[in-house]
Image (tube, helix red, strand yellow):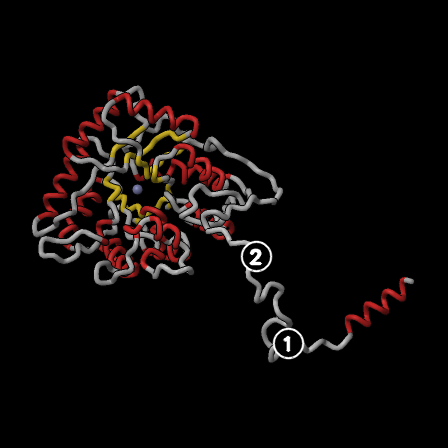
């Protein structure tokens, strides 16, 4: 009996290949199973199709970060008084979010109001302010004025400058009508002042490269572009290209080797970490943070793990939009090796996330130690000693 089966199997395997469907020696051997068929039922839209995953693997929810965290990219509500400071801190505690930087930078009297609110609150060491720069009309002499204002704001209690928004590069024009480039010489005095004051410059340059590409069905950010018309930068008569902005940014970094620059959103190179690595290698003054780009980290767990280990001294934690219930997604990606779990924003990414399982030594640096190093004004209390 066994021999009969074996003989039959050999006969089947050695039977001459049917010619039907064979195409010039290349391509599929016979038509692919669903080729030429159309769905019998109207297909759902990409917003409707949310299949439940049937994958059964270990799950580790991480509601609270393993170590206290500094969020350098915070956008909590405006700090109009001590009560709002206390309310924000209450929402930070369950997450183990120790310090949040108010990256809606404020200057002059508005900065003073926020600093006063923090100092009068029950938690004067939990929220810190950055200042901002008004780059809407940078003409001759503006650099010196901005540098003086920067110095005054740092004296008034700001620990850094930012978030300098993407309008710088994409939108702002000079009084002569030309676009204000990132490496404009007028601003040299500002970046040099930041270097002298030893404060970080937190800057968001451009946007994901896909926002500059045609909005077709091959664009990874089609849904986001469709939801937010103001994120479409395809018109070259109105906007520079992504690479033009990167080139200006890189020249700015090169010109100011003593200024600490923190690029927001992994510099929009989360989809090409090798490129970001080359940037780190070239500019020892450069840092980055991970706000709103978790989808890129979580889709390449092995590459991202190795990248975080290699550049562990250069990466800071940042979240961007202040939604306390979204932080645990970050903790889970950084701290676990979980597989194929949901992300929180469908228009950033239609794929699932994987944990990158960072070792404690790296987590500590990303969560707080790098931030304490580049912002010496932060209170050490509440952080484990290294
Ligand atoms: Zn931001």
Residue 367 point in image, percent of width and height: 41, 37
Q: Could you tell me which secondary element the residue under label 1 belongs to? A: loop
Ligand 1 lies in quarter: top left
Name the quadrant containing residue 291. top left
State whether residue 155 is above or below residue 228.
above
Q: Residue furthest bottom?
A: 24
> Is ligand 1 less than 8 Å from the beta carbon at label 2?
no
- Which residue is drawn at the image coordinates 62% and 70% (left, top)? 31
User: Which class describes the residues within 10 Å of circle 1: few (<14), some (14-19), or many (20+)?
Assistant: some
- Mark 1 or mark 2: which is in front? 2
Instruction: Residue under label 2, please give it.
Output: 40
- Which residue is drawn at the image coordinates 39% and 31% (left, top)? 97
Residue 352 numbered mark, or none: none
Q: Nearer the viewer, residue 280 or 272?
A: 272
Instruction: Residue under label 1, please give it.
Output: 22
Q: Could you tell me which secondary element the residue under label 2 belongs to? A: loop
Q: Nearer the viewer, residue 91 or 125?
A: 91
Q: CA distance from mark 1 to mark 2?
A: 28 Å
Screen quadrant of the C terminus: top left
Q: Confirm whether residue 368 shows in the render.
A: yes
Q: Nearer the viewer, residue 349 or 115?
A: 349
Earlier sequence position, callout 1 versus callout 2:
1
State whether residue 138 is above or below residue 369.
below
Screen quadrant of the N terminus: bottom right
Residue 166 point in image, percent of width and height: 26, 49
- Which residue is drawn at the image coordinates 38% and 28% (left, top)? 92
- Which residue is drawn at the image coordinates 40% and 26% (left, top)? 93
User: Which class describes the residues within 10 Å of circle 2: few (<14), some (14-19), or many (20+)?
Assistant: few
Q: Confirm whether residue 305 shows in the render.
A: no
């Amino acid at each position: 009996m066994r021999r009969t089966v074996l003989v039959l199997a050999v006969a089947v395997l050695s039977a001459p290949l049917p010619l039907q469907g064979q195409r010039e020696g290349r391509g599929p051997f016979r038509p692919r199973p669903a080729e030429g068929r159309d769905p019998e039922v109207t297909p759902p839209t990409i917003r409707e199709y949310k299949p439940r995953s049937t994958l059964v693997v270990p799950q580790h929810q991480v509601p609270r970060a393993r170590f206290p965290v500094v969020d350098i990219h915070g956008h909590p509500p405006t700090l109009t008084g001590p009560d709002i400071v206390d309310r924000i801190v209450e929402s930070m505690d369950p997450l183990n979010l120790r310090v949040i930087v108010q990256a809606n930078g404020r200057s002059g009297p508005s900065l003073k109001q926020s600093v006063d609110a923090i100092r009068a609150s029950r938690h004067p060491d939990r929220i810190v302010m950055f200042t901002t720069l008004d780059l809407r009309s940078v003409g001759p002499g503006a650099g010196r004025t901005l540098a003086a204002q920067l110095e005054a704001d740092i004296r008034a209690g700001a620990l850094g400058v930012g978030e300098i928004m993407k309008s710088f590069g994409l939108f702002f024009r000079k009084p002569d009508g030309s676009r204000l480039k990132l490496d404009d010489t007028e601003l040299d005095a500002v970046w040099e002042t930041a270097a002298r004051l030893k404060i970080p410059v937190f800057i968001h340059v451009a946007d994901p490269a896909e926002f500059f590409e045609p909005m077709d069905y091959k664009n990874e950010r089609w849904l986001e572009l469709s939801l937010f018309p103001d994120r479409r930068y395809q018109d070259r008569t109105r906007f520079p290209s992504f690479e033009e902005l990167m080139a200006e940014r890189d020249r700015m970094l090169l010109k100011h080797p003593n200024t600490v620059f923190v690029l927001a959103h992994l510099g929009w190179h989360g989809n090409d970490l090798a490129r970001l690595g080359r940037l780190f290698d070239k500019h020892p003054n450069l840092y980055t943070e991970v706000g709103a780009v978790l989808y890129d980290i979580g889709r390449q767990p092995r590459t991202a793990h190795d990248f975080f280990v290699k550049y562990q001294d250069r990466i800071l934690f940042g979240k961007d939009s202040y939604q306390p219930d979204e932080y645990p997604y970050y903790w889970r990606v950084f701290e676990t090796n979980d597989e194929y779990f949901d992300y929180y924003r469908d228009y950033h990414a239609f794929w699932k996330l994987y944990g990158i399982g960072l070792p404690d030594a790296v987590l500590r640096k990303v969560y707080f130690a790098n931030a304490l190093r580049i912002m010496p004004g932060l209170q050490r209390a509440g952080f484990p000693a290294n």
